[in-house]
Image (cartoon, grey):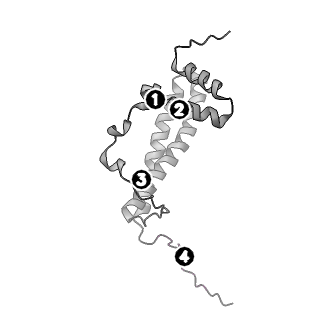
Amino acid sequence: ELSCSPSSSWTRRVWKARELGTARARGTRALMADKEDDKYEAEDFSKYLPESAKKDQPAQKWQFYQPEQSSRVNQCFQRIKNGAMLGGALGGSFGFLYGTYAAIAYRHILYIPISVVQAGFGFGLFLACGMVIRCDDQLPNRRLTNFPTDHVD
């Protein structure tokens, strides 16, 4: 059995709401009428707000995010970062395969994380360096061959 002490504020509100009626609207009004008895409800907390929050402020205008055209340096950095991540993932997976083989062959479990980190770092470094070389290109869509667009037999 649950026993509610009649001295608590919550139970006083519930009993007062029951006395005035169990309808939701009447119960809500009864709870709101009990504000004078509650010190927390009577407290004015607006004194803790800054002055700018006390004034009416206009509604915020929503704007769609339109990314700026990134500079060449940002594009190059993104390419290097993507190359390093791709190389790290590829190297880590090959390192896991080799490390698993080495751990079984030499019966030492620490070969797995060591080979994953070493191969991931190595592949990531080489792919990042390859992306640095690609960043040097002036034209983004440069063709290897220069065929004419209209071919005549």
Residue picked out by circle 4: 145
Q: Amino acid at mark 2?
A: Ala
Q: Nearer the viewer, mark 1 or mark 4?
A: 1
Q: Secondary structure at mark 1?
A: helix
Q: Main secondary structure of the magenta part?
A: loop
Q: Is residue 127 visible?
A: no
Alpha carbon distance from label 3 to label 4: 25 Å
Residue picked out by circle 1: 36
- Can you tell which quarter of the image residue 70 is in? bottom left
Alpha carbon distance from label 1 to label 2: 7 Å
Alpha carbon distance from label 4 to label 2: 85 Å
Q: Position of residue 30 (x, y in %)?
A: 58, 31
Mark toward the start of the polypeptide (3 vs 2): 2
Alpha carbon distance from label 3 to label 2: 73 Å
Q: Quadrant of the C terminus?
A: bottom right
Residue 62 lies left or right of residue 96; in this view the side is left
Q: Amino acid at mark 1?
A: Glu
Foreground pick, 81 / 64: 64
Q: Going 47% across and 34% down the picture, which residue do you hit?
A: 117
Q: Bounds of the magenta span?
A: 140-149
Mark toward the start of the polypeptide (3 vs 4): 3
Residue picked out by circle 3: 129
Q: Decide: is 88 above or below 142.
A: above
Mark toward the start of the polypeptide (1 vs 3): 1
Residue picked out by circle 2: 33
Alpha carbon distance from label 1 to label 3: 72 Å
Residue 34 sits inside the magenta stretch: no
Q: Going 37% across and 36% down the picture, which residue do you hit?
A: 45
Alpha carbon distance from label 1 to label 4: 86 Å
